């Protein structure tokens, strides 16, 4: 999503490197699709960037897709729909059909993908093309990433919205924690996401340590 900023100094490089050591098949699976799921502020985007760097150390080219770009409505419009009916909150907000088709196309070695990109502050969505010839790995990160098909590996960020409140205050969308309605939204998301946690191959815990799902 255009408008999000990643603090490169806080990338979780240790856990990313350890993940590739513990799961060597991640380096040999062709057209690997790795999903990172978790709640708001749990570190999904930072973990995706850390994994991209770790894969690059093994000369693997990585494409990162953000589920936020596949929401059916741009951010402000989607928020208004939630206000009108809080039952709007959930994976139904995301164009899962299109995202599944995108992942399938990657696994089938399509040459080009046309994907949406959200401009957060302009509250709009535009389309752009990605040339896929050089990409061997696709990382999809997002709240409902485990609701997708065509996944080879599932990584879950264990921090809850309550545990990340301080972080959400300081990041570029910090105003969201001042709105009680947003906390209600995050509580609903917590229930929806936590029931999928059991599907994870591995977890990143509160202290950003790697935990393997035995």
Image (cartoon, grey):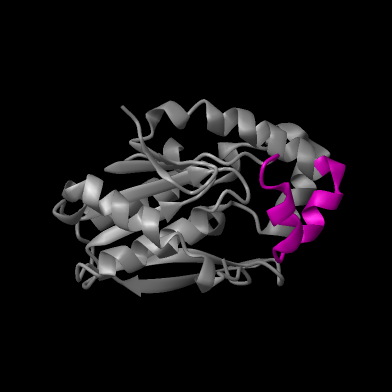
Query: Which residue lies at the image location 42% right of the left edge and 26% below the top edge?
Result: 198
**In the drawing, does residue 202 fall left or right of residue 91?**
left
Which residue is more in the foreground, 106 or 166? 166
Place of residue 148 in the rendered image (x, y in percent of width and height, measured from the top left):
40, 40
Q: Is residue 31 visible?
A: yes
Q: Is residue 151 visible?
A: no
**In the drawing, does residue 17 fall left or right of residue 80?**
left
Quadrant into which the N terminus falls: bottom right
Q: Quadrant of residue 143?
A: top right
Placement of 147 over or under 175, stated as above or below: above
Place of residue 69 in the rendered image (x, y in percent of width and height, measured from the top left):
54, 59
Placement of 9 over or under 157, stated as above or below: below
Q: Quadrant of residue 76?
A: bottom right
Q: Which residues are magenta?
A: 162-181
Place of residue 24 in the rendered image (x, y in percent of width and height, measured from the top left):
18, 49
Quadrant into which the C terminus falls: top left
């Amino acid at each position: 999503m255009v408008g999000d900023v990643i603090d490169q100094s806080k990338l979780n490089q240790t856990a990313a490197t350890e993940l590739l050591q513990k799961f060597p098949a991640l380096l040999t699976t062709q057209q690997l699709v790795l999903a990172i799921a978790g709640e708001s502020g749990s570190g999904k985007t930072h973990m995706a960037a850390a994994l991209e760097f770790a894969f690059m150390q093994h000369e693997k080219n990585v494409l990162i897709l953000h589920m936020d770009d596949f929401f059916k409505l741009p951010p402000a419009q989607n928020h208004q729909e939630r206000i009108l009916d809080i039952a709007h909150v959930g994976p139904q907000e995301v164009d899962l059909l299109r995202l599944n088709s995108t992942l399938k196309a990657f696994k089938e070695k399509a040459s080009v993908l046309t994907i949406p990109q959200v401009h957060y502050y302009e509250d709009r969505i535009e389309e752009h093309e990605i040339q896929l010839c050089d990409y061997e790995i696709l990382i999809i990160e997002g709240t409902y990433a485990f609701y997708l098909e065509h996944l080879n590996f599932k990584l879950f960020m264990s921090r809850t919205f309550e545990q990340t409140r301080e972080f959400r205050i300081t990041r570029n969308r910090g105003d969201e924690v001042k709105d009680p309605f947003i906390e209600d939204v995050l509580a609903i998301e917590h229930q929806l996401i936590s029931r999928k946690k059991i599907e994870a191959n591995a977890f990143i815990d509160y202290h950003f340590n790697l935990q393997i799902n035995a």
